[in-house]
Each structure stands twice: as structure tokens, then as C-alpha cells.
Amino acid sequence: MGQLFLNNVQKFYGDFEVLKSIRLEVKDGEFVVFVGPSGCGKSTLLRMIAGLDSVSTGDIVIDGVRVNDKPPVERGIAMVFQSYALYPHMTVFENIAFPLRVERLVEEKIREKVEGVARILQLDKRLQQKPGMLSGGQRQRVAIGRAIVREPKIFLFDEPLSNLDAALRADMRIELSKLHQDLKATMIYVTHDQVEAMTMADRIVVLNAGSIAQVGAPLELYHKPQNLFVAGFIGNPKMNFVPVTCEAAGPEGVTVLCQGQRAVIPVAPRDNLVGKTLTLGIRPEHTHLGHGDLLIDVVPSVIERLGVNTVAYASLPGGEAYCALLPGSAPVRVNETMKTGIRAADCHLFDADGLALERRIDWQKLELPEVTAGE
Amino acid sequence: MKEPAQLINRYKWYEILGIYCGIFVFLSFVLAPFVEGFLVSLKPLSQLFSSPYRFVPENGSFAAYRTMWESVPGFGRYIFNSFFISGIVTTVVLCMVVPAAYAFARFEFKGRGVLLAAFLAVNMFSGAVLLIPLFRLMRSFGVLNTYFAMIVPGVAFLIPSAIWLLRTYIMRIPKELDEAAYVDGASHFYTLRRVILPIAMPGITVVAITTFIGSYAQQFIFALTFNAKTEYMPLPVGLFAYFGRQEVIWNELMAASFVGIAPAMIVIFFLQRYLVSGLTAGAVKQ
């Protein structure tokens, strides 16, 4: 079992509140990713779960036991560090065996366990080498091996892939996902890379300035972000935010005035919206050349051609950045006006406080992300 | 063909000439006394005061290296004493400094800064300033004229700089290693023994060498003040035995000096094998 419950956990450094009353439940066997910009407190939260940082107020509960004052081993957690933290003077075998030696296990048992772990991680041929002779990916695997060998209830990963190059990172991502399927253990993973978050997580916890901005499945965050922060954080390129005025709100949706056009956005209305300034959220991948419920004319200043896609960057009359993700062969040129169209159903709408008006879609029925829809 | 030197290492001929002239001037100041000392040890005593003075010995021989053992029979004992005192001082200092430096490098505790500053301040006093109080202290404890009297002040005066030296080295070892060991259930002592000690070995060796040399150098003043027994005399004081009532046996004195340094040189030569850098390679991604 590896169930984790954070009950209003808070952390202060002096008077500064790093984490603001975090409440979160992680189910047994779940792969949860903490994601957020630097300084949002995600690593601190992980270190608190690990027992490396103390908890100012609130409880950390693992399998029904409050563990605030217990050392890491008694919590049943293992941690993989961003910098690997391998012992340079020990062989790979001794590195992986370290937690078992601390437990004073008998030699044959250690040998058996370490060799088992080495087989899973394809390190069998490297057991007698020192970490200095290994490549980055192999070092990372040794660090993971040292964590699995103890068979903990909960694995904690602190940005484990951020030191690897892009190709290796993609491989390790797949390996980690497989490992999670094989071990069926609870894993908590901290990253600032939303691709890692989207690809590996069962659930993503988006943290912003010390509090949870939203918790949800990857596609839920993509399709139904609850606030401007999550909307801007998930998705690449970033969502465009266009200021609009609310003209009417009814059962069919909210009518907004945008760049002199009217559009009905199918979202759940709220009281007292009429006349207010709202923010319309448009994902760059939902813009199409020429057709749509809403047309926005812009002059791109920079165009990036990536082969499969073309990214056009422009700014709106009000100065807001506007980005369009178009097919690779899109006929757009720098300094030539392009007409982008957006379907009203693809749009997001946020009130003046940055909270989303709920979209009327069932994201779980969408089998494919909407990138390909409407093309 | 010889590879051309890297651009950053390329010098004009006059620059090279200047560099070597500089090296020559400074080295001659440092090494000339040694050379002259060695030459003196080769000369017969009568030639030392000849006029005009000649640096290169005529019919020089190693006779002084043989006779020195006869004119001062206790000389072997003096070398042993020096070695013994320095060895014990180094061992004691290391035993105390390694855990202390680890604690100063890793733990946050009240008074850490004050303590470190105090150690630095103590370092600024030379032992000589405190000789008289130390003497009185030793006398009231009744430990004058023992090895103890020469070892304890030696240890006390060498600990501060050793702590500073080793603390700096340990601080360079990534903290994640301690955290990883802690997460894996290791106690502080286990971490110190299995993780920190092996990695800090080059630093510990440097501390051992400087402590040993420091102890060798400061013996003179402590031995002269706190010890009057011939059999406990360390080498630097023992050399006075060559100062006879009538004359100083210069050539044997010089020979004895060289012989006396030899054991220390051998120890340092063996210790420096552990001065391998790059032991932390692969610990963390730099």
C-alpha cells in the first residue's frame, strides 16, 4: 500500500509562506506529477513528504499513519535526486546495495536483490564499474535502482530527467512509465517540464506560488483549465489571452464582443457577467486560416517553420501577444496580414478574477486531443 | 612532429627568459641554504674556517654522516622522539578534527559562527605568546618533562587550522549525498564513515601532512620550554648536542639535520599517494 494524504500542509521560511495549506490525496499505485514554474514550492513539498524538510503546520499521512516526525526510512519512501547523488567511491553494485547494507541484510540476500534490480534496469554488465565511468542515463538508472531495491511504498522523484539530453529524456520517460506499470507502486514526480507531466502522469498537480492551482488528469487540465494560470501553463505554445466584453449570458452560452465581432462561447454562464471585461482563451493549435466562428486579423512579426507545423507570432491591437499554430505548409509570411479563424467551441472563457467559466464538453469522450479536429 | 603549444601557452623568447630568470632568483634564495648546508656536511671540520672560503669541498666525504652517530649517541632517540610526538599529534588531531569539521560543514547549530571565529582567533596567537602561562599550567599539573607536555599543546594549537581546512573541503562534497544516505536510513556516523570519509580522503591527507609538518616545526619551542630530560628531546632540540663546549661540530650538525628530516620526507612521500583529485567524479551532475 502506498497511500498519501496531505492535510493542510504549510511551510514557512521565517515569515515567508512557501506553501499555503496544501490538501491533496494520492491513491495507492497512482503516478502523480507536481508541476509548476521555478519557485512554486513543488520541490519543497516533495522534500517535506520525503522527510528532508520539516512541516510547519498540517499533517503528512502515509497509509493512515501520521509521519510528520518520522525519518524517511520509517515513512516507507525512497527518493531519486535531481543530481543523482551517487556515491562516487563505490561501485554500481555497492551504490544500489547501500540501503540494504544500512538495514544489515545478509550478503547473499543483498546480492540477490541487487542483481534483480540490475536486470530490470539493464545494469547487469555495469555492476563493478564506478559512477564516474557511466553515462548520464546509466547514472540515472543507478539512482533509480538504489530507490527500487528497498521496495518502498512511495517513490519520490525530484526532476530526475532534467540533467539528461532531449533524446535520452524521451527514452527514460518511457522507461519510467514502464517501471510504474511493473512495480505498481505510488510515484510522486516533480518536474517543470509539462511534456513529462502530460505523458507520464495519472494525475497532475499544478502548483503556483505555493498553492495548488488545479489537480486533474492531463487532458482534463488541457481541456478544462480552471483558471488563467493553468490555462497558460499547460499547452505549448502558450494559450492566447484576448480581452473581450460580455454582451449577454444565457443557457446557450456567453455572448462576447471580440475585436468588433460577436460570438457565443458555449460555457456555463454566471450571474452579473454582462458588461464585464472577460478573457477569451484561444489555444494556438485551435486557430485555422480563414474560417471559424470568430475571425482575428493579425500581422505576424516572426514565423517559425518546424516542418510539421508553422508557428506565427503576432500582437493584437491592444498589445497582447497572439500566436497561431498552423500546418507546416501554411501560406503565411512575415508582415503580411493573415486571417485566423477560431471555432467558438474551442474557446475558453475566464472572468475578471481569472477563474474559468466551465466549458460544455466532456473531455473524457474526446479520444484525440483537438489539435487534429476541424482540419 | 611536435604539436604546437596551445595559444594560451605560447610565449615570446624574451618572456620565457624572464620567467626562468624569475624562477632562478627565487629558487636560489630558497635552495641556497640547503645546498650550502649539504656542502658543509661533506667538508672536514678544518676546512670550514679556511680563508679564502671555498664553497666546493676539497676531498669531501660522507665521513660526518658516520661520525655524527658517535659524537651524539642519543641521536637516533631524538629522531624517534620527533617522529613519535608528531605522529601522536597528527593522529589525535585527525581523530578530533574529522568529526568536528563534518559537523561544522553540515549542521546548523547555535554558536557555529562564533566557534569558528574563535578557532581563527586562537590561530593568530603563536604558541610562543602563551609559553609562560602554559608552563605554569603544566607545572601545577606536574606534567613537565613528559611526552604529554609536548604533545598536548601541539594538538591544541594545530586543531583550529585543521578544522578550517577540512571544513572547506567537506563543504565541497555535494549535500545531496548526505541526504540520499539519510533517506536510505543511514545515521550520521554511518554516513560519515561510509560516504564522507572516503570522499574526503584527499582533504584529510592534506590536513594530515600539514599537521605533521606543523607539529615537527613547533616541537622546538615546546620541547625547549616544557622538557629538560635528554631522553625525551625531539630532533630540533637534540641538534644542540652538536654545540660542544669548545666548538660547534658544524659538519656533523648539518649531516644530522639532513638525516633528521629524512623520516618526515618519507612519510609525506607515502601520504601524497592519497592526494588523488577527481575522486568525486560522477557523484552528481555538475
Image (cartoon, rainbow, N blue to C red):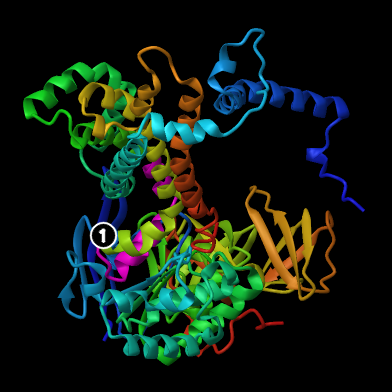
B117 vs A189, left or right, is left
Q: Quadrant of residue A47?
A: bottom left
Specify the amino acid type for callout 1: His
In the rendered image, the vertical position of residue B22 relative to residue A294, given as above or below: above
Taking the magenta stretch, the answer to whether it contains residue B186 is yes
Single out the residue that lies furthest toward the right.
B1
Is B52 or B226 nearer to us in this picture? Answer: B52
- The image position of residue A234, as x and y in percent, is 53, 68
Residue hosting label 1: B188
Which segment is the magenta one?
A: B165-187
Residue A71 showing in the rendered view: yes
Residue A265, visible in the rendered structure: no
Residue A355 location in percent, x, y? 41, 62
- Residue B178 among magenta residues: yes
Instruction: Tell me which residue sits at (63%, 65%) in the image.
Output: A237
Q: Main secondary structure of the magenta part?
A: helix
Tell me the element at label 1.
helix
Please state the chain letter of the residue tagged with numbered disc 1 in the rendered image: B
Say if B199 sits above or below B206 in the image. Answer: below
